[in-house]
Image: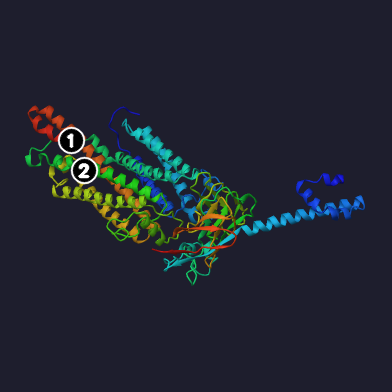
Amino acid sequence: MPRSVVKQDGHVKSFAKRLTPVQTDVRCTHFNYSSINWLMKNVFLIMVIGILGAGQMASAADITGLVTLNGPPPAEKEITPLMENPDCAKMHATTPTTHFYVVGPNHELADAVVSLKGVTGKSTGASAPPVVLDQKGCLYTPQILAIQTGQKLIVKNSDPCIHNVHATPIVPGNPESNQVQMPGGADLNLVYAQPEMFLRFKCDVHPWMFAWVSVFDSPYFCVSDKDGKFVIKNVPPGKYTVEAAHRKLGTQTQDVEVKDSDVTVNFSFAVK
Amino acid sequence: MKANAVSKSNPWLYWFAVLTALATLALIGVGGLVTSHEAGMSVPDWPTTKGYNMFLFPINQWLGGIFYEHSHRLLASLVGLMTTVLAVWLWLKDSRPWMPWLGVAAFLLVVAQGVLGGLRVTLHMDSLGIYHATIAQLFFVLTCAIALFTSRWWQGLERRPPARREENSADKHAVPEAGAPLRGLVLFTTILIFGQLIIAAAMRHQHAGLAISDFPLAHGKLWPDTGAEAVARYNAQRVSINAENPITAFQIELQMAHRGLALAILICVGVVAWRVRSSGFGQSKPSRERRDGTSNVLRRLAFVWLGLTLFQIGLGAATIWTNKAADVATAHVLVGALLLAVGALWCAIAFRESVTEIHDRRTEDRRSPGAAAIGAQPAMTGNK
């Protein structure tokens, strides 16, 4: 047996044994034999990785669903103080309203934070792309968002007026911060170490400005969109409790089991 | 500082003390606006203002919540300066041994209050706001008391020679009968008002808005449901423009305590006014003559107190009906401060009267030992 084959590691060696006749056929020159062997090894490795990857993809599934609101939501209020502030008023043609209940024509409920309850220690936040919270028209945009622990949250000021970005976490380990952000000022970069639901951001200069950022210790969460839909991607197989949390409506949970296909779970809230 | 206990009144000092008290009331008002507008943290640094020297902060940046917070800081600086001047003035010019120490107490309190306000901002501690608001009330009472004690009227009482008691037996005990039980009641009511102000400060500095949004009922009932499901329902139905914290059962109970205490205070103040009116307190000739109008002042103060209390309850209701409109809520804070001050000043005058009463009776007793048995009992009663 050629020395190069002896040096091969276990799994390649066994594969090479099965290919011995082929390899024998190409053993006409030492050079040719080595090249073919190198090529075979790499093709084999790529195949193995591909097969394993495909297997992994096949074993992870998405949890999808729809969040709805039964019954009429309380009426939103016009943010009249905003229009009394000259700097802010000029950015709005009409008086904006609060957005506690963003409900579609078929009762679809947006801004529900859906997550896998109790899944911790899985954060990929450090390598995840940053999430942006903007101040635009003297309002926070979006008003509800979610990030991972360790994930960078960029707070921008797109307004021509001063704001102060006042984060008011209540979970120990997440520091409260209150920073001035001038118009055109540098973005603020914030990172939170501990999971926390609905960490409030506010602007004390304009007290009607607020947003809530939920922090999770895993990538398995999603905020329902304007159609009430959510997708939690690539959930490994297992049994989970899916929790939907709305800032005003509280939380609901459902138990699901993820196998090798997507799971659908719907939530229906109601204003009592 | 002179050792004698009688001071010659200084109108300049008196008016400066009045001005300090009025500035303090204005400061409480602006502080109330800061909290009502949720602007307490709009300037995140202290003692600087957004990095500037506080007194050099550009006026074109006094916007939104910054306007209220920065105005509060500047007015607080002015009150601090005025208090310092007042304390030094009292130390140098007031001959009564205890008055300079009142000035020192005011100075220490205003410094502590300023530091507390600053720490509330820099430490991000809402709970410090409760202490800040409570000490503000005490400081206001102290400045009012200093103004009272520096007044010519008060110092006239101190210089007044022992009074001669009228021999008319019908009027002999007019003052003790009307005044003695009231002193205790007014003191008790004033303590209740102070407790009410602490509850109010706790309610406001939890930044949760209105825990109960209807009045006279509470969430549609005489006593609201504070179960977890009910509280979740209240929060779901509540839509507020500001970033208020969700309400809790404790906050609902706190507001109910506030309402209950308001009723108790109204009853107490009403009883005081009724007793004053029905007993002819302050209207009997000996009282009017002997006390240099003291009883009459107390009588009028009692009616002012009742009027303020009724107005305050109206403001409390309006605070709820207007969904805690900033100006209404701030007026509620201001009248609360006035209620405490009136009660405290009533007590100061009445207990001064009590001291004088004891002094007079003892003097009389020494002159006519036979009257001791008659005179001692009311004096003892008045001292309770």
Going from the N terminus, do you reach mark 2 or mark 1 first?
Answer: 2
Q: Quadrant of residue B291?
A: top left
On the image, the x and y values in percent for residue B105 come to: 37, 35
Image quadrant holding the C terminus of chain B, namely top left
Given residues B111 and A131, the one toward you in this image is A131
Q: Is residue B16 visible?
A: no
Given residues B348 and B383, the one toward you in this image is B383
On the image, the x and y values in percent for residue B298 come to: 22, 45
Q: Secondary structure at mark 2?
A: helix
Q: Secondary structure at mark 1?
A: helix
Q: Quadrant of residue B94?
A: top left
Q: CA distance from mark 2 to mark 1?
A: 18 Å
Q: Amino acid at mark 2?
A: Leu
| Marks 2/1 same chain | yes
Residue at horizontal 31 percent and vertical 41 percent from the top: B145
Q: Which residue is mark 1?
A: B357
Would you say B364 lies left or right of B91 here?
left
Q: Is residue B214 visible?
A: yes
Residue B185 numbered tag:
2
